[in-house]
Image: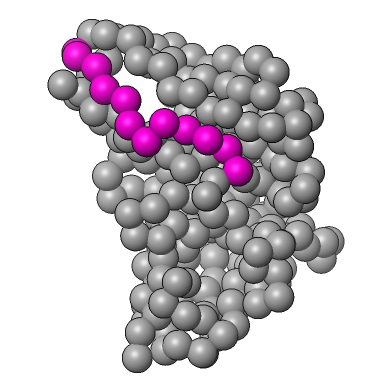
Amino acid sequence: QVQLQESGPGLVKPSETLSLTCAVSEYSITSVYYWGWIRQPPGKGLEWIGSIHHSGSTSYNPSLKSRVSISIDTSKNDFSLRLTSVTAADTAVYYCASQLYSTINHFDNWGQGALVTVSS
Amino acid sequence: QSVLTQPPSVSGAPGQRVTISCTGSSSNIGAGYDVNWYQQLPGTAPKLLIYGNRNRPSGVPDRFSGFKSGTSASLVITGLQAEHEADYYCQSYDNRVSGPVFGGGTRVTVL
């Protein structure tokens, strides 16, 4: 069973960059999975941010593409999210999750989530 | 506004059956992409409930069933119990977004 754990600052100032890392355990990040980020604003629904494969292939939600970057560190078995020029609208719980074989498939394992608040 | 449309809430008495609908379009469900369902209990991360339209992961009871037809899908919960009070989300792939899309979520309340 893949275990995922998000980490990063819980408070980010407006216009700055949000950075989160997802540590993967009990499974190699260079396996058949795609690794994704999903967010959930307080009291609202889920929004896919983007996904990455260890080959370096990435895909991003068009609504966030200009501000998002996802990278992978195979030596640390983790992957990271960067979201630039944040505003209060980016306040959300950020989840990392895995998809088997393709971004077309379901998210079968989820981290517990990390609340990030954008405020001065 | 979510790409997939779900009712905001459904409710039922203990033991009853409830159905949650998920309506998409020709770029997602109607294009043949699978529908998946997640259960989110209060204060927790979403958990995979149904994948590939109608398959249950190990450990999910058979009181949860998924169906897909045309541009829509549905999740049925039979024998409703207090522990089923949660938010339920449908998810598919959209070829206009070129990525996963979610429904807005449905809050299930046990009366």
Q: Could you tell me which residue is drawn at 59 percent across and 77 percent down?
A: A83
Q: Is B58 displayed left or right of A52 in the figure?
A: left
How is the model colour-coded?
A: one colour
Residue A102 versus residue B9: which sits nearer the camera? B9
Q: Residue at the location (24% across, 17% down)?
A: B12
Specify whether residue B8 is painted magenta. yes
Answer whether residue B55 is visible to the viewer in this image: no
- Report the side of A53 relative to A24 (left or right): right
By secondary structure, the bulk of the magenta-drawn segment is best described as: loop
The x, y position of residue B60, in whole percent, is 43, 22
Residue A80 in the image, given as x and y percentages of width and height: 61, 71
Percent position of residue B52, x then y: 65, 25
Task: Specify the quadrant of the image occupied by residue A107.
Answer: top right
Residue B66's place in the image compared with B43, above or below, is above
Q: Tell me which residue sits at (75%, 31%) in the image.
A: B26
Viewed as shown, does residue A28 lie left or right of B13?
Answer: right
* Between A99 and B73, the one nearer to me in the picture: B73
Residue at the spot x=44%, y=49% of the render?
A45
Please state which of residues A5 and B24 is positioned toward the viewer in this rendering.
B24
Segment tinted magenta in the rendering = B3-14
Viewer-nearest residue: A47 or A8: A47
